[in-house]
Amino acid sequence: MTASSGVHETAAVRSEDPARRLLTWYDRVKRALPWRGDRDPYKVWLSEIMLQQTRVETVIPYYGRFLEAFPTVEALATATEDEVRAQWSGLGYYRRARSLLQAARQVSATGTFPATLEGWLELPGVGRYTAAAIVSIVHGLKVAAIDGNLERVLSRIEAFDKDPKTAAGRLFMEQAAEIWMDLERPGDSNQALMELGATICRPKRPLCRDCPLVDDCAAFQRGEPEEFPLRRSRRRVVERELLAIAIRQEDRFLLFRRCAESEILGGTWEMPWVDATESSPARALGRRYGGDWKLGEPRGAVRHSITHRLLKVTVTEGELLGGGQLAEGPEARWADLAELDRLPHSSLVRKAMLVALPAR
DNA sequence: AAAACGTGGAC
DNA sequence: TGTCCAAGTTT
């Protein structure tokens, strides 16, 4: 690969080699993040799970609150799923919370955290990236943690002309990352590359003037850093329309707990909804939540649509007949507005609920 | 291998 | 307003 061109430099100029320059830059400008500078496996693990597909700024408050609620892996292991879910609420990708709890129980039963890449990979929710990040930071093992930042940074430096997500791309990334690994500080090498990707080598409008590696960057020399990394064509977004029924009692809303964990937002409390293509929404509601439903006629002032990614939600008023489901219990309960603020899926059901409020 | 999985910020 | 996409993992 092209980045190996620097290998033949003499020892005299070694202090200026790109990997050294990267670490020097990192030491100078790295952000002071709550999980930085702590090699406690529990904290590093937690931070890495929370950071999966989630921005640093989003994670910070959750990280602190979670540690207050569950200061140790033992504390987490003895928590209930609902307690963990409550701390995770709003962070997204709720499978992570379930996996985290399962993993905590595994670790607690074992008595100790893993200390190898393979050991970490056995924990649920810990994939190749996360395991690599943890062992490099916590145990100082020389393993590249290839995340989206690394893929972008390395694709640009090498002007790599393939999708990093392909098998060939992944192999290339592993080899390219190797060059940037400092034997003394593998964790910092990984974090430096990630920090560079997050703050300088951004997806859009990278700050190449401030980049410590600009002289090593093939994409910059071509004048088209934003063209990398190459990505396979996007799949078409298929929209699915849902009908959400706002069942109110003054300022409280009826929520249901859906049982299937495999569905979207599985296990969380939700507003009753059905697929909008159902020929008989009332009957579909009965199948989904039980009981006999009768839907009120949608009124213009109340009916409202929002679109969220693959979903379109239409809110309408409805009535629930047959009082059995109105009682609070494991399947149904009332929630007030304050609680709605703490519900996940804020862009979807919560907003749908709020627009269903009577006009002031 | 491709899809599913949440949310919020940027443009 | 719509699109992109972020410290990925799982099936």
Image: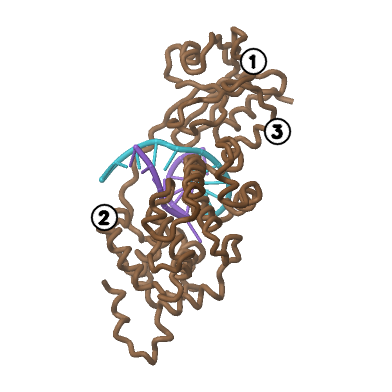
Chain colours: A brown, B cyan, C purple
Q: Is residue A90 visible?
A: no
Q: Position of residue A225 (x, y in %)?
A: 39, 65
Q: Which residue is mark 2?
A: A167
- Characterize the local packing of mark 1: few (<14), some (14-19) or many (20 or more) Cα atoms within 10 angstroms: few
Which label sits on residue A338? 3
> Depth-wise, is mark 2 or mark 1 nearer the camera?
1
Label 2 sits on a secondary structure element that is helix
Residue contact between numbered discs 3 and 1, judged by CB atoms under 8 Å = no
Q: Amino acid at mark 1?
A: Ala
Between the residue at mark 2 and the residue at mark 1, the CA separation in whole angstroms equals 53 Å
The reply to whether label 2 and label 1 mark residues of one chain is: yes
Q: Amino acid at mark 2?
A: Ala
Label 1 sits on a secondary structure element that is loop
Sequence-first tag of 3 and 1: 1
Which label sits on residue A327? 1
Q: Amino acid at mark 3?
A: Ala
- Characterize the local packing of mark 2: few (<14), some (14-19) or many (20 or more) Cα atoms within 10 angstroms: few
Residue contact between numbered discs 2 and 1, judged by CB atoms under 8 Å = no
